[in-house]
């Protein structure tokens, strides 16, 4: 990859992590005003509508003709459907701290899947860097008394499955960048998320006889602002940047950037919720950043020293 493209990819990765980090704060605001399923329905309605506008005016060109369309549908079952559904039910039986700890292991899971399906090679130092970044996240949550309560095994199991779902998405999406552009991948998965979560929300309201209250949260300005942020920035923009990254760099390297979102969420909590930043926050943040930098830089250095090619062979995923 050219240096300019690599610099852009790194910049977008940091922006993506920032949006994800702030999304925890906005999700808190949204869920305080609506059922989690309704929040997902409005979130994907906002993201799909925002992307449909430039598509309708022809500013964004899409071409699915003659391409493996069914594989994109399969991709959307991993993310957003599988990831968000498992996360929603997992957090009913576990704490958000446990979710944060377990999510930190997604890059490690991605590395395992990418090595098998895409034949991506990572050096021993890169693997240690990925674990270092994950340890930084775990360290922060454990030090703030957010350790894992093994009594909530149902929630923990579901949250672990979200790691598998997102790792599978990263690897699968990486393999599909040969046939589809990042925009084509993003538009379809957002559309599937919009239709599916909206249908699920309507079904829930119909079953409980509360259809007339479906749009009630939209009367709250804080909810509307939170949904716009979650839909347009945390979902649409993050999906676009993630798919662009996966078209430019290995899935294992792209995934580890997500751990930077922990640092952003700490900063957001300090700025807007006046949460205290302690020494363990700083130590954990240094470990996360060091792990991310190590994942990106150490492998290239080792390959240059050994004279091994930098290319990464891909294996097509089943389905």
Image: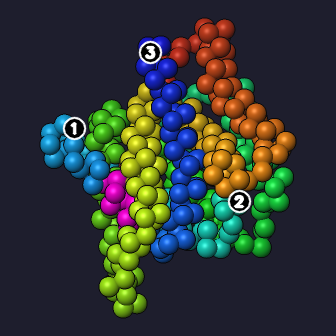
- Cβ atoms at labels 1 and 3 below 8 Å apart: no
User: For the residues marked 2 and 1, what is the alpha-carbon distance in whole angstroms?
Assistant: 39 Å
**Magenta-colored span:** 41-48
Earlier along the polypeptide chain: callout 2 or callout 3? 3
Residue for point 79% across, 38% down: 282
Please say whether residue 122 is one of the residues in the magenta stretch. Answer: no
Q: Which residue is mark 1?
A: 60
Quadrant the N terminus occupies = top left
Tell me which numbered mark, 1 or 3, is placed earlier along the sequence: 3
**Would residue 134 be seen by someone viewing this image from the given angle?**
yes
Residue at screen point 52% across, 69% down: 31
Judged from the image, the secondary structure of the residue bearing numbered disc 3 is helix
User: Disc 2 versus disc 3: distance between alpha carbons?
Assistant: 37 Å
Q: Of helix, strand and loop, which one carries label 2?
A: helix
Question: In the figure, 36 relative to 68: above or below?
Answer: below
Q: Which residue is at 83% across, 60% downward?
A: 145
Which numbered disc covers residue 233?
A: none
Q: Residues within 10 Å of mark 2 (few under 14, many from 20)?
A: some
The x, y position of residue 5, in whole percent, is 43, 19
Q: Main secondary structure of the magenta part?
A: helix
How crowded is the residue under tag 1: few (<14 C-alpha within 10 Å), some, or many (20+)? few
Residue 78 is drawn in which quadrant?
A: bottom left
Q: Do tag 2 and tag 1 residues touch (Cβ < 8 Å)?
A: no
Of 215 and 13, which appears nearest the observer?
Answer: 215
Front one among 2 and 48: 48
Q: Viewed as shown, does residue 309 lie left or right of 42?
A: right
The residue indicated by pointer 3 is 4
> Is the image coloured rainbow, by chain, by secondary structure, or in one colour?
rainbow
Give residue 124's position: percent from left, percent from top.
71, 27
């Amino acid at each position: 990859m050219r240096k300019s493209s690599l610099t852009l990819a790194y910049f977008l990765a940091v922006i993506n992590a920032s949006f994800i980090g702030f999304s925890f704060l906005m999700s808190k605001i949204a869920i305080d005003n609506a059922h989690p399923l309704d929040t997902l329905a409005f979130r994907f309605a906002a993201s799909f509508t925002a992307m449909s506008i430039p598509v309708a005016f022809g500013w964004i060109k899409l071409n699915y003709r003659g391409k493996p369309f069914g594989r994109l549908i399969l991709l959307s079952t991993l993310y957003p459907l599988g990831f968000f559904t498992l996360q929603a039910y997992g957090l009913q039986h576990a704490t958000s701290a446990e979710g944060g700890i377990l999510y930190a292991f997604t890059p490690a899971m991605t590395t395992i899947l990418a090595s098998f399906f895409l034949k991506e090679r990572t050096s021993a130092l890169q693997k240690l860097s990925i674990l270092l970044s994950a340890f930084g996240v775990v360290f922060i949550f454990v030090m703030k008394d957010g350790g894992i309560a093994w009594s909530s095994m149902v929630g923990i199991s579901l949250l672990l499955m979200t790691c598998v779902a997102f790792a599978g998405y990263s690897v699968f999406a990486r393999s599909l960048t040969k046939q589809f552009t990042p925009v084509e991948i993003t538009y379809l998965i957002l559309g599937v998320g919009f239709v599916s979560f909206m249908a699920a929300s309507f079904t829930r309201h119909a079953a409980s006889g509360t259809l007339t209250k479906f749009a009630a949260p939209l009367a709250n300005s804080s909810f509307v602002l939170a949904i716009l942020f979650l839909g347009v920035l945390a979902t649409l923009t993050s999906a676009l940047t993630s798919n662009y990254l996966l078209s430019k760099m290995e899935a294992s390297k792209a995934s580890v950037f997500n751990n930077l979102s922990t640092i952003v969420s700490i900063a957001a909590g300090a700025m807007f919720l006046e949460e205290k930043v302690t020494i363990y926050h700083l130590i954990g943040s240094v470990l996360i950043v060091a792990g991310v930098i190590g994942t990106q830089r150490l492998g290239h250095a080792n390959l240059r020293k050994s004279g091994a090619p930098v290319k990464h062979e891909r294996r097509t995923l089943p389905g």
